[in-house]
Amino acid sequence: MARELKRTELTNIVYGSSFYGGGGGGASEEGLALIQAMYEEDPDASIKMIDIAQMEEDPNVVSTMVAALGSPVATKGKTFQKESVNAVKGMMEEARFIGKELKYVYSGEMGGGNTLLPLYAAWKCGLPIIDTDGNGRAVPELNTGLLPVHGIPTSPVILASEAGDTMVARTEDPMDCSACEKIARYMCQAFDQGIGIAVWMMNKQQHLQASAIGQMTLAIEVGDILTSSRADAAVGKLKDYFASKGTPFLPIVEAGTITDISITSAGGFDTGVTTVRADSGEVYKVVFQNENLYVQALDAEAGDRTIVTVPSIISMLDLSSEKMAVPVSNSETYVGQRVALTETKADARWYDLPECYSCWDEVMASAGYRSIKPEVKFW
């Protein structure tokens, strides 16, 4: 059924999607800034969210995702309001050009900035948002995603700048998401490491085939837990919540401190390593390329061992305030920060095909990952 999302729900989405973003998808401050912009423009603003069942059956009635593409560090604090709206409008024109009608917007990935952005763009364009997500987590590249793995064409891609420059990229093979990624990253660098992108035009049947259905509701529920719990109680509350859902969830570090961060920003990515020492003494290395990719337990005697990899969601929660535990992206971490480190099973669609793992191969290799050891859990 349809649901009106107001400020409370939108705020919960910011924090819930930051958790599901697993270190990527933009900072929560970006999502909160988008909410503030909405309510400064219209104090009674609300966004209509519909279930998949409410989409029209006509295969030519479609939706689009919209997101910000670029380096989270280089674009930290930027909200991409104009870029997102320009990208959606560009996709509406492209839909008309090929005989389709774009009537919906959906979130392409989870993250404090990149989940609120499609909601903001939908509101500005007068379109409803769908209770789904293209990935159910954040992903570093167009080819590391549920939609291409499950047969959804990536092309055409709409890229839009803040100034209103709109580019349409069509690949010879609509499934060639690697080519789309190269084009998008090149344009991202041309526009100061950040640009708006609309992609994966989908009808109802394609959503049923490929997307993480109900993910927006999950973000609202997790966000509600975080905003209503003290920092020292948040991990326990999350553990109870995911147990009630039957979703595997593991606190790797219930409380600890970041002791080191190494990070480089290039090519539209933030790549690096965060080292966390648990209060109980264990030391962990979190390797990321925008999103957290894998965690290693460091042991001088037994040797380092990998304990979790993508597609599972590796989240870091800031415990520095007593008021609430705030999920943080890798653009928001700092040495000395008090954090919790958790692992959550991603949407079930991430585990139903071998390609759900192999699509990460190049990203994992570039982040220094060499082999899967027996300790790694595949749900």
Image: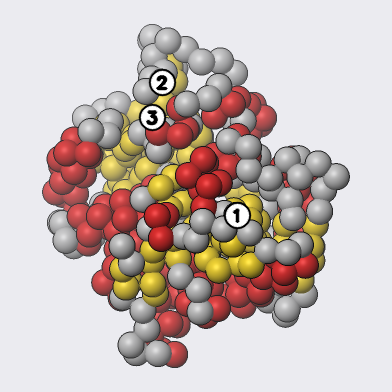
For the C terminus, give its image quadrant. Answer: top left
Horizontal arrangement in the rendering, residue 82 relative to residue 258 (left or right): right
Horizontal arrangement in the rendering, residue 209 relative to residue 312 (left or right): right
**Mark 2 or mark 1, which is nearer to you?**
1
Say whether residue 23 is visible. no
* Count of marks, rendered view: 3
- The residue labelled by disc 2 is 378
List the single residue furthest toward the front: 58
In this orientation, which residue lies closer to the viewer: 206 or 349?
Answer: 206
Question: How would you rate the neighbour count of disc 1 (Cα within 10 Å): few for under 14, some for 14-19, many for 20 or more?
Answer: few
Q: As displayed, is residue 241 above or below residue 221?
A: above
Q: Within the image, what quadrant is residue 46 found in?
A: bottom left
- The residue labelled by disc 1 is 59
Q: As displayed, is residue 47 above or below residue 266?
A: below
Residue 284 disc label: 3
What amino acid type should be assigned to the residue bearing mark 3?
Tyr
Q: Residue at x 74, y 55 (%)?
A: 156
Question: How would you rate the neighbour count of disc 2 (Cα within 10 Å): few for under 14, some for 14-19, many for 20 or more?
Answer: few
